[in-house]
Image (cartoon, rainbow, N blue to C red):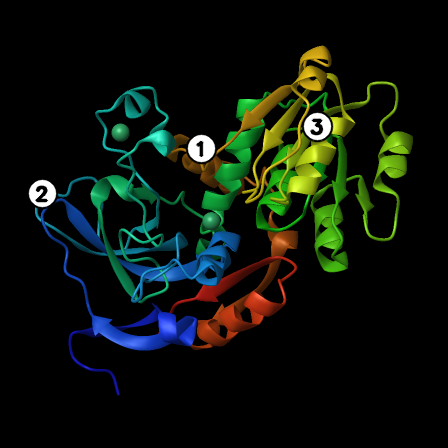
Amino acid sequence: MRREGCMLAAVYRKEARGLRLEDLPEPLPGPGQMKISVRYASICGSDLFLVRSGQLADGTVLGHEMSGVVDTLGDGVRGFLPGQPVIVRPVGCGSCAACASAQENLCPQRLAIGLGALKGAFAEYLVVPQEMAIPVPEGLDLKLACLAEPLATALHAIRLAGIGSNDRVVVLGAGGIGLCSVALLKALGVRWILVSEPQEGRRNRAMALGAQRGVDPMAEDLGKAVEEWKGKEGVTAVMECAGNSETTKLALQMVAPGGKVALVGLVKGTVDWAPALTMLKQIRIQGSFANTQAECRECLGMMARGELNVEPMLEGVIPFQELPACMDRLLHAPGEGKLIVEVSFG
Ligand SMILES: [Zn+2]
Ligand SMILES: [Zn+2]
C-alpha cells in the first residue's frame, strides 16, 4: 500500500552497502523550482564508484542520468508546462569566471542531482531549480533521452581534444563512456576507430556502434594489433575511457607525434610519465570533466534527428523494484552496456 504524501525511492544505506527501496516524503517545488515525475534513469559507472567507495552519505538518492515529465511548477517558473518531457542537468552559479565562459562544468558551486547535494532520479519524483531542466525534442523516446548526459560527456572530450573526422582514434575501454565515445565519434564522421576492451559483450556493442576494429587486450597483443591497424598516419588520437593507470600510460606511448590524448576515465592511481616524450612528440594531453548544458542539448538534438545511433549500447530496461538487486549484481560483475531503470508505477 502506498502511503499518502510519500514516494518510492532507492536510498543508499551504509549498513546495507547498497540501495534499499524506501518511502520518502514526496517533495514539493518551492519558488523557481519544478517537480518532475521521473520516467527513466540510467545506471552510471560513477554510481557504482560512489557506492563502492564507502564515502557516500547514508540516505543519498543516486541517479543523475534521467528523463521525465514536468509534474508541478513552483511559483514564478516560466517556459515549462506540466506534462512536458525534460531531462535534468547540473547548473553552475551563473556568476563565476567558469560560468561566464560557458564552462559551468568547472563552476565551484556546481549543483547536480544524484551525486550528493540534491536528491537524484532513483525515485518517483525530484524537485530541481528550473534552470536544471532541458526540454526533450519532440518525438525523441524518453528511454533514449536519459542517455544525453553520458553522451554529452563523450562529446565534451572529443571537442576539447580537437578530435575530427580525419583522425585515427583508439578508444581504450568500452564501459558506458567508452561506448558513448564510439557512438559520438561515428556520428561525427570518424571512420577509423579501434576499441580495446577485455569484455566480449562490450566489445561487440562497440563494433555495432561503429568501431572498425575490436581488440581483446587480454588475448591479443594490443601493441601489435594497433601497429597493423594504424596505417602511415599512425594513431592520431586516443581516448582513455578505462580509468586505469596502465591504459593511460599506454595511451601516451601509442599516440603518434602531434597527436592528442583525451583523459575521460577517472584514474585513481598515478602514472609514471616522461615529460620529455610528451614534449618531443608534441602530444596534447587533454583532461575532460563532465559536460555542459549546451552539449546535452546538442546530443538530444542529434538523437532526435536520427544522427546518433545509441540502440546497440542498451543492455536492457529494468523495473524500478529490481534496482537494488541490480546494483548489488553490478558491484560484483560489471554490465556490458547501459542499463536503464524504468521508473513508472501504473
Ligand atoms: Zn554519469
Ligand atoms: Zn559558477
Mark 3 element type: helix
For the N terminus, the image quarter is bottom left
Residue 74 percent across, percent down from the top left: 12, 51
Q: Give above or below for 346 relative to 72.
A: below
Which one is earlier in the sequence, the residue at label 3 or at label 1?
3
**Three-letter amino acid code at disc 3?**
Leu
For the C terminus, the image quarter is bottom left
Q: Nearer the viewer, residue 192 or 200?
A: 200
Mark 1 element type: helix
Q: Residue at x 54, y 42 (%)?
A: 266
Residue annotated with mark 2: 76
Q: Residue at x 24, y 83 (%)?
A: 2
Q: CA gap, disc 3 to disc 2?
A: 51 Å
Residue annotated with mark 3: 252
Image quarter of residue 225: top right
Residue annotated with mark 1: 295
Q: Nearer the viewer, residue 100 or 254?
A: 254
The mark closer to the camera, 3 or 1, is: 3
Please give left or right for residue 307 compared with residue 87 in the image: right
